[in-house]
């Protein structure tokens, strides 16, 4: 029988943790969410020396305070699930900052092996770390690794197994704080041990004491189910207040300073700085891409290049796929001809039509888009773009990081909504998700380019994009003003430029595309089936009649355009295909084309996006966003119709 | 000319304190204190901007955009508002 081991990966963001995870588990991964949380959970298994090892990739965090859901998820997993070994992935080129998390892992009193990663990159920067000395200082094994090449991974696993089987004994560093802090930690700790023995089965008493002294709101809430909690918290509160009075700082700052001074001391003792490196290519690239003036044209150039590459290349691939799939569709229709016509329609138009739409959008547009985006992200360009965009984003109550989900939105709104998780607060996630639904995704771009771009001219299509960006900005700003709460400022690491790793790029691309495949795709197919059924039963005709005053009266579109717009809820580009089947596109006036494209772009997030909004934000906010989008589309469409007529006249 | 009363006591003899955002590009300063909400102050400390730490202002974004600072060997981007809430004592000497 094989022995089982559970290993968790913990580390800062941008340290190559996901590369190590991929090296360890290969393709044996299950990516999902932490139960009840919108935090991604990646898990994989591997076999090594007769062990079956389950690896959990904890979210990348800088600390284990209650700052974010990610930090709470990580520390709860470590304390409650008690994995056999924690692999702490550390960036050798930024040891001091990384040790801050290591020290907090040590506070949790769990078995740790350190993967001292990116030693090659550190060496390039003139930084050498004495791993043996570091291991002695921390009292835990330290294995130097270069995750990208796989170097050190085998030693890492050997060490993990040796630690789990008891071959290696740990003598972990016990961090002692300054006297006045230590005294208070120990006082609270004694009380925890005496009064709250139940909680000590999960969390070390000393850790609870430290967290209480740090005014950790999450731990304080957890204690509320225990007896005498009020009195107890009051005591801890008093200790924290005394300490704050002595130092003139909030207690978490005092403890962070203490940890950092330990981290700094250890880092200095084990680091050898070699000849200061001359200015590298990466630094030059950094200087120019975040340049006060040059940075912006470069950013616009990068984005335009990406878009033209994807949409020009994509349209060829898409029409090729479409012709192949149409042939298959024909075969299906012929093959099923013996069945009643309604059933043939359901299978062919409903099910296969849905699959076809998913494939012709995902393969030619979404997949390449996310590959390029992952390249930009892994190389380090995206944080620089966020840096440049921070100021503009602030006007919408967001900050620079929101630029990333916004750009994701040009691919598919579903992963973009999920990408809004990088925002720190609920409020920011809501604003970002709202704005994302107004960004034309690949399917909407197909409408804009295929209708307006083709028949009215590229300048008109471009004008729609610029109008959309302006609208996004205005509506984002309104949302920011209307929603209660304080905006959060930008605090973001700027990782150095590096050569992107193929494995990471592919893994990232897949993790975003899979949101489309698993969430959007089934909904597209199911929705396609439903609407085909409604069409057969004649319900659509009825709806078209009901919507007539809106469609032709207010928006100035042909009456029949209502049907495509109803179907467009499923998947936007279907609206154009259907429109062309009902009305010859060239018979539409330029104004009608522009109005149709505007409405299709804004009017409702497609069903898959609504599903993503539901998952990420809950029912109320998902309904609110949908409602606002519809209202905006009707308003903008009607106004555009009237204004454009005036302009032309 | 930056003088503030914080938490009821004066922060040293601080004629020459300024906000981190006010440093010139390439200039260094030592963090004295961060002012602002509990969450922000804690986050800044966790990212390494604890009192007594030397920071270097690497770059200022245009149009009042964020600043890039180097602290503990790591490059951080801080929104202008955030960087205005960190008080530093400028370091005159440029040698490390």
Image (cartoon, rainbow, N blue to C red):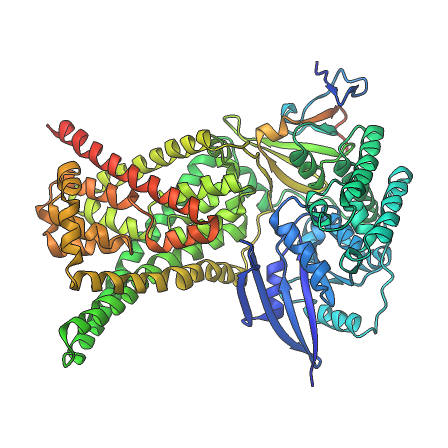
Is B15 in front, or is A524?
A524
Residue at image position (70%, 37%) is B42
Is A300 in front, or is A583?
A583
Residue at image position (69%, 43%) is A217
Furthest toward the bottom, the residue is: A1
On the question of residue A357 being in view, the answer is yes
Furthest toward the left, the residue is: A587
**Residue B5 left/right relative to A37:** right
Residue at image position (59%, 43%) is A494
A477 up-or-down from A319: above or below: above
**Residue A594 left/right relative to A307:** left
Q: How many marks?
A: 0
**Residue A425 left/right relative to A77:** left
Report x, y in % for residue A614: 43, 52
Report x, y in % for residue A219: 72, 47
Furthest toward the top, the residue is: B1
Report x, y in % for residue A11: 67, 55
On the question of residue A126 being in view, the answer is no
Quarter in which the C terminus of chain A is drawn = top left
- Residue B14: name its quadrant: top right
A326 up-or-down from A14: above or below: below
């Amino acid at each position: 029988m094989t022995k089982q081991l559970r290993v968790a990966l913990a580390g800062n963001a941008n340290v190559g943790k996901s590369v190590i995870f991929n090296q360890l588990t290969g393709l044996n991964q299950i990516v999902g969410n932490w139960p009840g949380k919108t935090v991604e959970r990646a898990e994989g298994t591997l076999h090594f020396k007769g062990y079956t090892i389950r690896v959990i990739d904890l979210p990348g965090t800088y600390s284990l305070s209650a700052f974010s859901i990610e930090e709470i998820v990580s520390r709860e997993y470590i304390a409650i699930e008690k994995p056999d070994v924690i692999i702490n992935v550390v960036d050798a080129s930024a040891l001091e900052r990384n040790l801050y998390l290591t020290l907090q892992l040590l506070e949790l009193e769990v078995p740790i092996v350190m993967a001292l990663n990116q030693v090659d990159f550190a060496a390039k920067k003139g930084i050498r770390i004495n791993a043996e000395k570091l291991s002695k200082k921390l009292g835990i094994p330290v294995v130097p690794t270069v995750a990208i090449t796989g170097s050190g991974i085998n030693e890492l696993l050997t060490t993990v197994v040796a630690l789990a089987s008891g071959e290696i004994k740990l003598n972990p560093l016990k961090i002692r704080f300054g006297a006045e802090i230590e005294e208070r930690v120990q006082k609270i700790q004694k009380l925890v041990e005496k009064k709250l023995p139940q909680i000590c089965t999960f969390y070390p008493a000393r850790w609870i004491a430290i967290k209480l002294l740090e005014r950790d709101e999450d731990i304080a809430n957890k204690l509320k189910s225990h007896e005498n909690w009020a009195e107890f918290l009051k005591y801890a509160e008093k200790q924290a207040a005394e300490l704050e009075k002595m130092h003139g700082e909030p207690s978490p700052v005092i403890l962070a300073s203490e940890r950092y001074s330990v981290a700094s001391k250890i880092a200095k003792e084990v680091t050898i700085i070699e000849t200061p490196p001359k200015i590298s290519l990466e630094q030059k690239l950094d200087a120019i891409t975040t340049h006060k003036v040059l940075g912006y044209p470069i950013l616009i150039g990068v984005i335009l290049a990406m878009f033209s590459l994807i949409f020009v290349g994509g349209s060829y691939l898409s029409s090729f796929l479409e012709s192949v799939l149409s042939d298959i569709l024909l075969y299906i229709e012929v093959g099923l001809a013996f069945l009643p016509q309604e059933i043939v329609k359901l299978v062919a138009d409903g099910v296969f039509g849905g699959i076809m739409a998913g494939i012709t959008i995902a393969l030619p547009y979404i997949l390449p888009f996310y590959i390029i985006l992952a390249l930009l992200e892994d190389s380090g360009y995206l944080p620089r773009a966020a840096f440049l965009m921070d100021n503009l984003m602030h006007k919408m109550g967001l900050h620079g990081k929101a630029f990333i989900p916004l750009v994701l939105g040009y691919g598919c709104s579903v992963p973009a909504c999920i990408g809004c998780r990088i925002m720190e607060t609920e409020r920011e996630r809501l604003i970002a998700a709202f704005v994302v639904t107004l960004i034309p995704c690949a399917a909407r771009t197909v409408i804009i380019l295929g209708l307006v771009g083709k028949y009215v001219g590229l300048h008109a299509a471009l004008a729609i994009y610029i109008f959309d960006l302006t609208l996004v900005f205005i509506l984002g700003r309104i949302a920011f003003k209307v929603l209660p709460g304080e905006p959060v400022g930008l605090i973001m690491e700027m990782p150095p430029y590096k050569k992107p790793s193929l494995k990471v790029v592919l893994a990232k691309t897949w993790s975003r595309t899979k949101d489309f495949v698993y969430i959007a795709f089934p909904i597209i197919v199911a929705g396609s089936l439903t609407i085909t059924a409604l069409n057969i039963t004649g319900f659509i005709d009825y709806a078209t009649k009901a919507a007539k005053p809106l469609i032709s009266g207010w928006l100035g579109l042909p009456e029949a355009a209502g049907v495509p717009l109803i179907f467009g809820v499923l998947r936007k580009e279907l609206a154009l295909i259907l429109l062309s089947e009902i009305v010859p596109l060239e018979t539409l006036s330029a104004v009608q084309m522009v109005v149709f494209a505007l409405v299709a772009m804004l009017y409702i997030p497609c069903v898959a996006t609504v599903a993503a909004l539901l998952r990420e934000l809950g029912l109320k906010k998902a309904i609110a966003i949908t409602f606002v989008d519809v209202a905006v589309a009707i308003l903008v469409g009607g106004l555009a119709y009237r204004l454009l007529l005036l302009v032309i006249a | 000319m930056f003088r503030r009363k914080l938490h009821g006591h004066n922060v040293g003899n601080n004629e020459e304190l300024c906000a981190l955002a006010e440093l010139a590009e390439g200039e260094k300063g030592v963090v004295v204190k961060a002012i602002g909400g509990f969450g922000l102050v804690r986050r800044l400390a966790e990212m390494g901007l604890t009192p007594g730490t030397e920071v270097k202002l690497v770059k200022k974004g245009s149009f009042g955009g964020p600043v890039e600072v180097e602290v503990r060997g790591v490059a951080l981007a801080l929104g202008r508002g955030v960087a205005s809430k960190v008080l530093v004592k400028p370091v005159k000497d440029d040698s490390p």
